[in-house]
Image: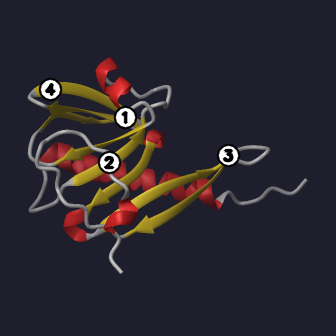
Amino acid sequence: MSRGIEYGRLMHDAMRGLIRQVLSDVAENGLPGEHHFFITFDTTHPDVAIADWLRARYPEEMTVVIQHWFGDLDVGEDAFSVTLNFGNSPEPLYIPYDAIRTFVDPSVEFGLRFETQDTDEDDDESASLDEADPEQEESGEAEIVSLDKFRKT
């Protein structure tokens, strides 16, 4: 039986490693310059830990912004945790890397998008790089952001 190369899985592993490395640097040294991140993740992932009221408000996916106020950023091998402010209420979040759907740093027009396509056998994942330029949400509230609406033509 021949074995195939799982390029999709390998690409996702590399992209998640990049996210882990970037977040590790931020945890150690803070955000440099104008860098900030929009991270969209799957709130139905079994290992995601967020407050019940956030899960009720975002039952499928949620986008968080790591920029002006964040605390307790702890970067692990399989996940990261961070405390973010939601309407003057600090909330801890635990987000596994494999729950991340998009990771965008609009200050340098860099983005990663993880796509999943269901097949009859296993999930076949593909990866892509995006350019994005989302505007910052001034209210400090979490908001689901569609990257396509920010794509430059």
User: Which residue shows up at 31% across the image and 58% down it?
Assistant: 104
Among the two numbered marks 1 and 4 on one chain, the one whose residue lies closer to the N terminus: 4
According to the image, what is the colour scheme of the structure? secondary structure
Horizontal and vertical percent position of residue 81: 28, 32
Viewer-side residue, 47 vs 86: 86
Mark 2–mark 3 distance (CA, rounded to whole Å): 22 Å
Helix, strand or loop for disc 2: strand
Residue type at numbered disc 3: Asp
Q: Earlier in the sequence, mark 3 or mark 1?
A: 1
Q: Quadrant of residue 135?
A: bottom left
Residue marked by disc 1: 95
Residue beneath disc 2 = 39
Kind of element beneath mark 4: strand
**Can residue 98 be seen in this snapshot?**
yes
Q: Earlier in the sequence, mark 1 or mark 2?
A: 2
**Alpha carbon separation for disc pair 3 and 1:** 20 Å
Q: Secondary structure at mark 1?
A: strand
Q: Is residue 51 visible?
A: no
Element class at badge 3: loop
Q: CA distance from mark 1 to mark 2?
A: 10 Å
Name the quadrant of the C terminus.
bottom left
